[in-house]
Amino acid sequence: MPRRVPTVTDAIRGEARGTAPVPLSVLDLVTVGSGRTASQALATSVELSRLAERRGFHRHWVAEHHSMPGVASSSPAVILAHLAAHTRRIRLGSGGVMLPNHAPLVVAEQFGTLEAFAPGRIDLGLGRAPGTDGATAAALRRTDRLNEGADDFPEQLAELTRFLDDDFPDGHPYARIHAVPGPVQGPKGRPPIWLLGSSGFSARLAGLLGLPFAFAHHFSARNTVPALDLYRDSFRPSGVLDAPYAMIGVSAFAAEEAAQARRQVLAGALAMLRLRTGRPGLVPTPEEAAAYGFSPAEREFVDGWLANIVYGTPDEVRTGLDDLRKRTGADELMITANGHGGEERVRSYELIADAYELPELPEVPEP
């Protein structure tokens, strides 16, 4: 029987392993806890990617954030190149690159380079938000017309796609410009594009273009179901997908004891509270979070934040993730575990893998 040739759709749709109802993946913010360094946080990301690969998580994505001391993921392409050197099987990608912050040609070159490093393993997730505050976005883009960048997102996306495919039409100003590495060097694959969002704009655009869609449930839970419904209702089959494929990012933290998990997520919630109130910093220790005197307004924010995190014992987290998957109909769950400790974060993913009986996959030898 002739061997089946992998398609773009194969690169998008994951495989559910163990008893998991859908594929499980990792969203990594490269968080930096108080008393720790960016070097330690990046080393944790390597450890996490190797664990995720060994235990059958489908992909490991890195988010783009700027001017946030507690998040060391300002340069996803650089981090992904490092992770590619330490893994052999797992898909790696951006969750996402904030396209209005960058020239489309630069993104095409960066991810063409990543594809050359790790052929067939790279995803290009794109968002239209700045991934930071307005002043930092203005510094990144060298303009204070920030709404203009978001409004131009469909045009930027089309330009980026043309660079990745090297197919600007004759007469176009960029017809003789090539993203290298890229197709101008010969037939090759290219990273599949995902659209990311926390509202309906990217959901509808992804549907109209027939692209996979990833929704940020972990910080916009109220909009999850409406956005996924809009994506599915808007979907038009394309050369990429013949049916919708929706992934959601979800905050989840498992520990041997529920109290341990709560200590970590409370630290993460305090970090988010400080960020939202203009006081960004390193992720506080669980001890600092436990001793913090929350005002009534702050307590309301933190309680609301924690309500959208699935945390507790491994069995409790598995039940919570299963319930969320049923409510949303998500085709894939991308788990982010945000807390103070790197060891505790890695352990959380391992416990979730155990809860779903994910297999220990054999190591892929170095080429």
Image (cartoon, rainbow, N blue to C red):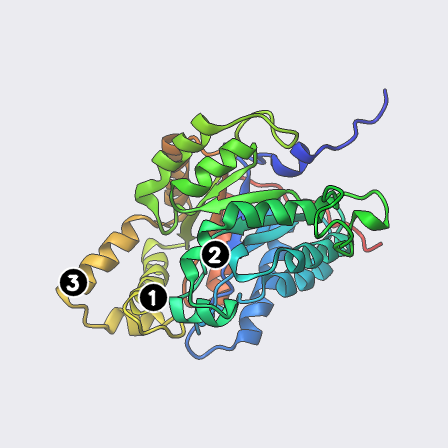
Choose mark 1 or mark 3, whichever is in front: 3
80 or 351: nearer the eye?
A: 80
* Numbered circle sitting on residue 149: 2
> Picture quarter containing residue 279?
bottom left
Which residue does the image show at 41% across and 57% down from the upper left?
147
Instruction: Give the residue type at disc 3.
Output: Ala
Residue 166 image offset from top left, x and y in percent: 75, 46
Instruction: Give the residue type at disc 2.
Output: Gly
Q: Earlier in the sequence, mark 1 or mark 3?
A: 1
Which residue does the image show at 30% across and 71% down from the upper left?
278
Rounded to the nearest angstrom, the CA distance separating label 2 from label 1 is 34 Å
The secondary structure type at the circle numbered 1 is helix
Q: Pointer 1: residues within 10 angstroms few (<14), some, or many (20+)?
A: many
4 with respect to 300 (left or right): right
Instruction: State whether residue 141 is above or below residue 318.
Output: below
Label 3, on which residue?
297
234 or 39: nearer the eye?
A: 234
Which residue does the image show at 51% across and 77% down from the upper left?
37
Label 1, on which residue?
267
Rounded to the nearest angstrom, the CA distance separating label 1 from label 3 is 17 Å
Instruction: State whether residue 295 is above or below residue 36.
Output: above
109 or 167: nearer the eye?
A: 167
Residue 267 image offset from top left, x and y in percent: 34, 66
Quarter of the N terminus within the rendering: top right
